[in-house]
């Protein structure tokens, strides 16, 4: 099937690790029908951090002069796929030709960290929220007062948050791989026309390092990064009241907020003593996988979808996973009949002494493969876009 210029798929992205997989998927289902425009600060392709420049990838300087020129060049296209929405990509989004179809592939940050779309305080436990407020400097409040005038006068735009809000409210499709998250977001934005597009940046086979490996230890993996939304402090308090002397609590803190990482590390060592081990330095993948294989239990205390890849990998490997029941990922997995557990009701001494049985592990694998297997995701994506561009 050969697309005309009008219905070729135009992708707007940045030099992010997710884009390699997105490129592979779209070229797999519709070869040579995609053009990926990559917004970069430096047009030297050797400076790319994650991407290797392909024939149908074009680097665009991430400044307003270049972006405005770019907008003139794409006025005959119709289908635009945005991989995440930040300030500059939203500026493009909001100035596309009138009859454009706009596909928004969710990263998460553009919704959950935009004060005009979501109250970020709802993502933090009481103790973590206090810590977060303490970390805010007075200079940040002063900066907020002058931001609106700065963007309007210098860049002739709204603030980044308002540009993103406008984009979100005018998207035609939201790409996310499960309906619970789509319904949650749609219920909180002013966009009645928004429709669901099933899309995952990583099919299951791309997430799992060795598909045959099961976890073999009884350690606990706590969180995925030094991000406040992990709500580590609340879990450390809970675990400190249980007997976990036969386990190690493995806590990845090598990327994210350094101040937060420091506090979590100190709190973990203080309350869990020798049972706590923070991973504060970056580890090569093979060494990190050794830690994962020793974790028969996983606690991800996010109140929203986050660390989805980590959760899927650990479920595949046979770990017992605990999530917060406010998290749409928890509700999605429960709908699929996956063995997954609720932090608020199930995280107790008994459950931490009972790893998943062999039957439960195989049951989870079967469901995940049927839901997120490479062949299934690609076929659904291909069917969707062939129908979409032929309307």
Image (tube, rainbow, N blue to C red):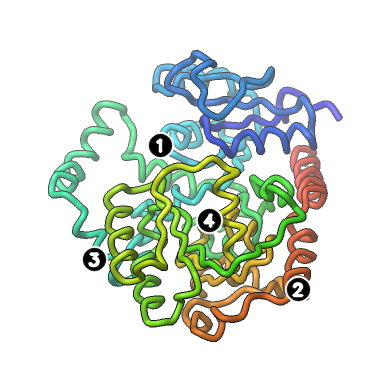
Q: Is residue 147 left or right of residue 156?
A: left
Q: Earlier in the sequence, mark 1 or mark 4?
A: 1
Q: Please say if the residues under marks 2 and 1 sit with CB atoms less than 8 Å apart.
A: no
Separation (CA) of disc 3 from disc 4: 23 Å
Separation (CA) of disc 2 from disc 1: 47 Å
Q: Quadrant of residue 143?
A: top left
Residue closest to the eye, 228 or 382: 228
Q: Earlier in the sequence, mark 3 or mark 1?
A: 1
Tag nearer the camera, 2 or 3: 2
SS of the residue under disc 1: helix
Could you tell me if residue 12 is visible in this image?
Answer: yes
Q: Earlier in the sequence, mark 2 or mark 1?
A: 1
Residue closest to the eye, 230 or 114: 230
Return the x and y of residue 156 as percentages of the image width and height.
Answer: 31, 29
Residue sitting at the far right: 1
Question: How dense is the environment of label 2, judged by Cα within 10 Å: few (below 14), some, or many (20 and up)?
Answer: few
Question: How dense is the environment of label 3, judged by Cα within 10 Å: few (below 14), some, or many (20 and up)?
Answer: few
> What residue sits 42% from the left and 55% below the top?
112
Return the x and y of residue 75 as percentages of the image width and height.
Answer: 59, 24
Residue closest to the eye, 122 or 259: 259
Tag nearer the camera, 1 or 4: 4
Return the x and y of residue 329 as percentages of the image width and height.
Answer: 58, 65
Q: Earlier in the sequence, mark 3 or mark 4?
A: 3
Location of mark 3 (residue): 130
Location of mark 1 (residue): 87
Question: How dense is the environment of label 4, judged by Cα within 10 Å: few (below 14), some, or many (20 and up)?
Answer: some
Q: Earlier in the sequence, mark 2 or mark 3?
A: 3
Location of mark 2 (residue): 358
Separation (CA) of disc 3 from disc 1: 29 Å
Separation (CA) of disc 1 from disc 4: 23 Å
Which quarter of the image is occupied by the N terminus?
top right
């Amino acid at each position: 099937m050969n697309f005309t210029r009008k219905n070729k798929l135009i992708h707007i992205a940045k030099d992010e690790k997710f884009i390699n997989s997105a490129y592979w998927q779209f070229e797999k289902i519709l070869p040579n029908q995609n053009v990926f425009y990559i917004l970069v600060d430096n047009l030297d392709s050797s400076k790319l951090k994650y991407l290797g420049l392909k024939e149908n990838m074009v680097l665009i300087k991430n400044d307003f002069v270049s972006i405005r020129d770019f907008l003139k060049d794409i006025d005959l296209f119709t289908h635009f796929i945005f991989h995440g929405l930040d300030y500059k990509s939203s500026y493009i989004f909001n100035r596309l030709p009138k009859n454009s179809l706009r596909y928004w592939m969710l990263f998460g940050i553009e919704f959950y960290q935009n004060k005009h779309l979501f109250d970020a305080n709802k993502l933090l436990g009481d103790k973590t929220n206090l810590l977060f407020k303490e970390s805010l400097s007075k200079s940040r409040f002063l900066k907020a007062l002058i931001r609106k005038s700065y963007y309007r006068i210098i860049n002739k735009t709204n603030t980044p948050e308002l540009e993103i809000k406008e984009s979100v409210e005018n998207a035609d499709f939201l790409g996310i791989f499960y309906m619970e998250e789509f319904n949650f977001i749609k219920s909180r934005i002013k966009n009645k026309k928004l429709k669901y597009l099933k899309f995952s940046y990583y099919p299951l086979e791309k997430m799992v390092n060795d598909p045959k490996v099961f976890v073999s230890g009884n350690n606990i993996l706590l969180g995925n990064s030094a991000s406040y939304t992990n709500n580590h402090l609340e879990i450390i308090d809970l675990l400190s009241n249980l007997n976990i002397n036969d386990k190690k609590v493995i806590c990845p803190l090598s990327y994210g907020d350094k101040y937060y990482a420091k506090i979590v590390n100190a709190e973990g060592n203080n309350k869990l003593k020798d049972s706590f081990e923070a991973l504060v330095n970056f580890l090569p993948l093979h060494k990190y996988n050794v830690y994962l294989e020793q974790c028969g239990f996983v606690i991800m205390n996010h109140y929203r979808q986050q660390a989805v890849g980590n959760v899927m990998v650990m479920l595949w490997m046979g770990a017992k996973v605990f999530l917060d029941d406010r998290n749409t990922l928890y509700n999605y997995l429960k709908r699929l009949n996956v063995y997954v557990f609720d932090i608020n009701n199930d995280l107790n001494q008994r459950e931490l002494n009972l790893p998943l049985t062999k039957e439960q592990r195989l049951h989870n694998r079967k469901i995940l493969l049927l839901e997120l297997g490479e062949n299934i995701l690609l076929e659904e994506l291909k069917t969707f876009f062939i129908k979409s561009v032929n309307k």
